[in-house]
Amino acid sequence: MHATVRAALSATRRDMRSFVPILLGAFVAAGCAAEAQAPGAPGPAAPGWQRYTSASFGFSVDHPADVVLLPETGQPAAPSLHRARFMQKDVAAGAFADREIPELTIEVFARGQAASLQAWLEANGRLPAGAAIEPGPPLPGLETVAVRLRQALAPNEFVYVATKGRIYRLTAVSGTGKRMLASVQVRD
């Protein structure tokens, strides 16, 4: 490769590396501003939104009409008991929907004998080295933890909620997903 082209590519990569944290910060700020209420907070669905309820796995979530539940094929990967992925309707209709990142994913796991949510996360390898662990959004009577990975690629933020018998992992990757996350309710 010509030296001038190589120098230009190197400068472009360097410029992009300094731009990524700014862009990422803007996305995080936009997502945080979009959160209207803590997950599990009572309240009606937003106008034009619908409520999905899984009686079998004890959760509900509100979603816009243009977001649908992506059908699951087969059993979820162990140790997950159930997975619900919500995606834009047009994306979900595509040939590669299974490879797209959903607006919101809710995974349900058995809690087992773990004394605490932190103990379950450690025992199940859900706390990678360098992950930031913070208290999750307050849900009356439920234990919550927010885990943020250092990697810049999404998804890198997870909210875990523990009930007596289950652990829920909530993963939102967009402003819509974060507003949906704010509507999630779980029952003990």
Image (cartoon, rainbow, N blue to C red):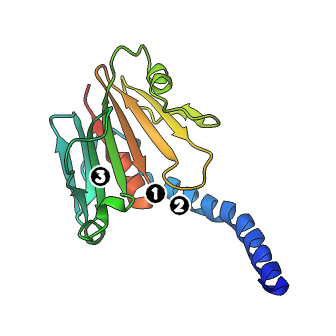
Q: Tell me the element at label 3.
A: strand
> How far apart are the alpha carbons under marks 3 and 1?
20 Å
Q: Residue shown at 44%/30% (left/top)?
A: 144
Q: Name the foreground residue: 100 vs 31.
A: 100
* Left or right: 154, with 90 as reference point: right
* Left or right: 144, with 98 as reference point: right
**Cβ–Cβ under 8 Å for marks 3 and 1:** no
Tell me the kind of residue under disc 3: Arg
Marked residue nearer the N-terminal end (2 or 3): 2
Q: Tell me the element at label 1.
A: helix
Vertical placement of residue 180 versus 54, above or below: below
Q: Residue furthest front?
A: 1
> How far apart are the alpha carbons under marks 2 and 3?
22 Å
Residue denoted by label 1: 34
| Residue 127: x %, y % from top left | 54, 32
Tell me the kind of residue under disc 1: Ala
| Residue 129: x %, y % from top left | 62, 34
Residue denoted by label 3: 85
> How far apart are the alpha carbons under marks 2 and 1?
6 Å
Tell me the kind of residue under disc 2: Ala
| Residue 74: x %, y % from top left | 19, 46
Q: Name the foreground residue: 117 vs 126.
A: 126
**Cβ–Cβ under 8 Å for marks 2 and 1:** yes
How many numbered marks, from 0 up? 3
Quarter-of-image position of residue 152: bottom right
Residue denoted by label 2: 30
Circle 1: is it few (<14), some (14-19), or many (20+) Cα within 10 Å?
Answer: some
**For discs 3 and 1, the disc positioned in front in the rendered view:** 3
Quarter-of-image position of residue 106: top left
Q: Quadrant of the N terminus?
A: bottom right
